[in-house]
Amino acid sequence: MRRLLGLQASVRRIYAYTAYIHDRLAKGFAAASVVVSLAHSMAVVTGLPSFATDPSSALLPLLMMTSLIYYISIVYIAYSMAQELGEGPAALYLSHPLGRVEYLLSWFAAGLLTTSILYLASIVAPVLVMDPALVSSVDMAVLATLVFEGLVTGAFVFLVALLTRRRGATFFAGLVYILVVPLALSIVAAIVAAAVPRQTLVETLVKTVFMLLYPCKYYAIERPTNAMATSMPSALLSLVLLGSCLVYAKRKLEV
Amino acid sequence: MLRVLGIIAIVIGLVTALLLAYLSYIGFSTLAVSAYSVGIVPPAVHVTERGTIVAVAVSDTVYLRGRVEGYRYTVSVFTYNPTRLTVERAETYLLSKKDFDAYVRGMLVAFRAAVVSLDELRSTLRKTALDYSPMHSRWRMEYIAEELDMRRENEVIAVVVVEYNPTGMTIDLPNGTIVVTNPTILRTINLSLLPPIEVPVRVHVFARLDPSLDQYLRCLDLVVAGALLVASDLLSRMKLRARTRR
């Protein structure tokens, strides 16, 4: 019973701190959401007939562009956490009865859960307004791969923020992860494919790394028949990374 | 988060309503699906009483998998004349695939075997077609059918009947001579010697925005829901502030 009450209190503290983070970052959330909502509304109103004919092909190019805003929002939230850890305010919050794990879970909720909910809402709402019957035809596999990619990105940048506690390093690592690494992997894959006609170990390795880190981009390029199955390893990887963040925070986080 | 969700709902509701109003005002339409096929008409073409030769081309089937509320679907059929022959008359018939399979497919075989006359074929096509229209000559001998309402059909086929003036058509005879045709020569030679005629047919299904009242009401619903979310968030904040002051 006491444990249950403790858990309840812990959840209440996480909720309160998450609300505080939301308040602090409300302007950024609103700005990003407005941009994404505008793009999705325009695309849905003008492209719904082709979207209804072939949902995945019509939706994917747009989502590949707007998802950048989604991933950069996650990086920005990790950046804010690194700023808090590096510049001192975190010590103040943690001196309250807020545990380190609770502190980190609040950031995860604000950085991963909230952004994912807002992003998915901005996709589904215009479809719902135009034709509610079409909501069921939205390709859930595409949305799932997008969210998994966001989770892996978030887990990586939160880990960097926690380890370095430097906002600059976190933001830089996030941007490199989002923009440079996929490009570099594609170039390596192209060079290997051009040099050796048959599939080599290097090519397989590059593809596997790409599938693991960028399930949505992998889906857009390779179009696997079972997108959920190919993005499951990414979900597992993000869980492992988030778990290691929590373990690190519990054992080694000093503020 | 409630406030941001509310803002998203308001933005999406407003933007969608404005876009629906503006785009329908300017007559926005978008390509939903298209099919392209090139029918090579067999040499056994008909020679009509007016001395023209007839080519009948059938397009690929256009599948429209899903329809969206607030869009009116229309079909446009395009064909052009890659030969040097003059087109005397051209018509487009738009049929549902079901009716095409039931009534027209067999008749086309009979027409090519000269068992059925052109008038009989035209009469059947007119009876079974969702819509039909003569084609008007445009730039580069392109023929654009008037827009045809698709009604409730999801699989449609276009049949294009073109009458050419054979004057100037070249025929390679078995003895190696090349004959330039005219209506008189056509009546005397073996029709199987006529070269095939290419009839490319392109079918486009366009969706024209025609928003329903329901869509505007749903936009309004979304705006109201968003405003409620923002208001409830602000109210809870004000309550909290008042409690803290006390």
Image (spheres, helix red, strand yellow):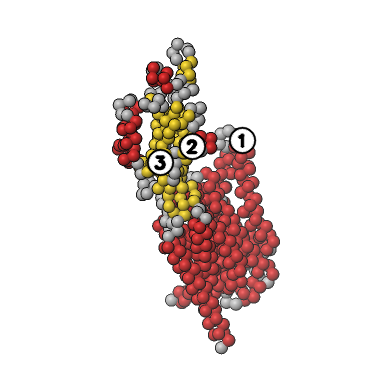
Give the amino acid at mark 1. Ala
Label 1 SS: helix
Residue sitting at 42 percent across and 35 percent down?
B90
- Viewer-proximal residue, B108 or B234? B108
- Residue A168, given in percent of the width and then of the height, sits at 69, 61
Residue B168 higher or lower than A235, as above or below: above
Left or right for B103, reference B66: left
Residue that carries the numbered disc 2 in the rendered image:
B137
Residue sitting at 58 percent across and 86 percent down?
B245
Residue sitting at 68 percent across and 63 percent down?
A166
Q: Which chain contains the residue that carries disc 2?
A: B
Of circles 1 and 2, the one toward us is 2
Give the amino acid at mark 3. Ser
Q: Which chain contains the residue that carries disc 1?
A: A
Residue sitting at 58 percent across and 33 percent down?
A197
Give the amino acid at mark 2. Ser
Left or right for A214, reference B115: right
Residue that carries the numbered disc 3 in the rendered image:
B133
Residue that carries the numbered disc 1 in the rendered image:
A194
Label 2 SS: strand
Which residue extends farthest bottom?
B246
Image quadrant where residue A221 sits: top right
- Viewer-proximal residue, A168 or B4? B4
> Do tags 1 and 3 sit on the same chain?
no
Residue B143 higher or lower than A48, as above or below: above
**Distance between mark 1 and mark 2 Cα atoms:** 50 Å
